[in-house]
Image: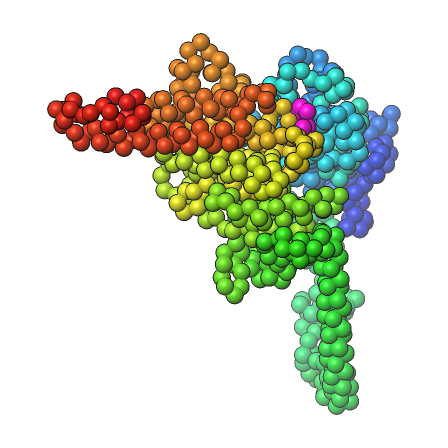
Amino acid sequence: MSLISLFLLPWLLPSSSSTFIDPGALFGCSEWENVFYPFGIRSEHSTLHEPYSGFDLYCNSSTNSSLKVLIGGSLIDVVEISLKGGYLSVLVDHAIRFGSCSRTSDRTPKGNLLDLRGTPYAFHTRNKFTVLGCDAMATVRDPLNGDILSGCVAFCVSYADKQRGQSHCSGVGCCQDVFPPRHQYATVELHSIRNLTKSMELRTNLSEGCNEAFLMDGNESSYADPSIKRPIVLDWSIGNKSCKDVPSPICGPNASCYNSSDGLGYRCKCNDGYEGNPYLDLQFAEIDQCKYHEHNCSWKCQSKGGRYHCACPPGTKGDGKKDGVGCTRDTYIEIGLGTGLALLVILLTIGFWFFCELKKRKQRKLKLKNFLQNGGLLLRQYVSENQFFARIFTIEELERATDNFNEKNVVGRGGYGTVYRGTLLPDGEVVAIKKSKFVDETQIEQFINEVVILSKITHRNVVKLLGCCLETHVPLLVYEFISNGTLSQHLHEQKRPTSGRLSWETRLRIAAETARALAFLHCKAASVPVVHRDVKSANILLDENCTAKVSDFGASRLIPMNQTHVTTLVQGTIGYLDPEYFQTSQLTEKSDVYSFGVVLLELLTTEKPLSFSRVGTVRNMASHFLECMEEKDSRVGVLEFLDRQLVWEARTALPVLAVAQLARRCLNWNGEDRPTMTEVAIELSALRRLAMQSEEWRDRRSSMSPRRLDAVDESMLNEEDRLLL
């Protein structure tokens, strides 16, 4: 086959066809006769010149092997080529593995994705970064600056979970994340979550198989078999510059240049009215006779079949020529059009009215169905018995309050849902509306019971539940609006909601207020103890006076009076999660105590609980803190660990060390050795009172003359004053 015939063949194909093979099977060389330029086939019998570096395809016609492309010094099987979509699908095996199948003892294996540097290819956004395994966390990093490009975590409680995770990728046994555009190279790190949380031993039923991280086509679902090669999608483009940076793009005469959305360079496309390969110097477009030839049409000239004819405006008739009959009015057509238009307007009006009525009826049925499924009858029973002290909202009220849940009203996103800022009409009350991502239909009765209990809780340090809406697929909860952001924002973000950093006195007060709120939830003040299960700085809101407000009870659970714990699926935030709860799945009140201990460390260090920018055990702040406390001179080690600015503000290290010792007791691995939240709240309140009295005594002492200070009657001093003297 000649070179010209090879380039002309794609023009004979429909322009919408850009896929050559079934992605489920590799074709031999004989099936790859038609290849779009700038791609070209090279074999031992072909001397096709290289149009552009990296677009040569290789084929051994003697063995009729599959078509391959040369990337990174290796020939890789080609599955699909798309000219219109601008992508290339290939088969690769670049998985990073460890576990019982690993050949190395390294607990954090590292590897590289397919190296595309020096080629016209980049990773397509259709790819998904996938992790298979149990308790595995993988991240993809940019090797130049170390930024995390993608990553996810796969959890398992048992080996059966790992087997179930092979049928669908939902986070149990398998997880996936999107991959950003315009990247040609990246490194992969695969971690063991149990190693990060310092688990004492790995369960034997989880050690079967191995953990695996890889990149694959997001349209594929064959990720469960680790022995096969997986397809990935590559974006191809010309060069690595945009259209405006290239003096003369290689596009054909009736084509235009456009920048690749996922790649690094540009591609070509045919102009409107033309079709074919935009990279070739050929054109098969019809010539516009009206544009290039003189005509005598009085209104409009139209080209058709290589000829032209004159058209008349609607409502007129004739030949449309200036030197002929021209165009004259057609009264019959005008009468028919007027009558038809009137009937059409009447029919459309009636049809639109019927459509609106049917839509309203369908919406009413759907709202009633959701209301019943979400436990509306049970909630009405509580209302009739005066056990529900909140308001039941309609979906229309909340849609008006949030401008139909406009994105501009989003004030927070979390693992359990999205929080919107809304203004209730007509009183103008500002509220926070939480829209959950999912709800367990088997736990509706427990959900309603928790909503009723939370509606009864009135505490100055707990965000007040104002009501709920059950007319949507997922129930909506309405809380009071706290305007000053979260504790996490104040501690870790550069642009904080308030000016300046939180002082030592403010941090100690926030810790004491949060402890009082959790102690209140754990006690029987709300008739049934409530375990928050997701205590973290992001769930502690601050008002304009920096008063702490515990929020987000989406993961909370009730513990019956006659039980010490409940067995649940492990939920929470890595870095705050109780290791005992993580291993046993038994949730107790002491799980909140551990998470609160991590919050205390955040207040003492102004550092995040888990950060991959730190190395070794320092990544996990709780583990690093416990190591410092176990040193011979633990006081020196802890002082090096804490925020020195806080020690300076406290004027002495004693109160800061006292809070650190309290955090150490809260972070005991054994829940029985941890204090209760009531004990924590009492101790923090005592430390805060002592700090306030010490500050008052220092101010009093500084105002006395030396002689007067010596004359102070010691019997007039309280216990804290004597300690200071």
Q: Using the rendered view, name the quadrant where residue 311 is placed.
A: bottom right
Q: Residue at x 75, y 89 (%)?
A: 335
Residue 528 place in picture, x, y as percent: 62, 40
The part of the chain drawn in magenta is 582-586
Which image quadrant: the N terminus? top right
Residue 552 place in picture, x, y as percent: 57, 42
Q: Residue at x 69, y 40 (%)?
A: 126
Colour convention: rainbow
| In the displayed structure image, the side of residue 229 where residue 692 appears, left or right | left
Which image quadrant: the C terminus? top left
| In the displayed structure image, the side of residue 8 where residue 582 appears, left or right | left
Q: Is residue 12 magenta?
A: no
How many labels sit on residues? 0
Residue 641 place in picture, x, y as percent: 43, 21
Residue 198 place in picture, x, y as percent: 60, 18
Q: Nearer the viewer, residue 4 or 255?
A: 255
Q: Residue at x 21, y 28 (%)?
A: 701
Question: Is any atom of residue 218 visible in this view?
Answer: yes
Question: Is any atom of residue 29 visible in this view?
Answer: no
Q: Nearer the viewer, residue 651 or 391?
A: 391
Q: Is residue 34 above or below residue 382?
A: above
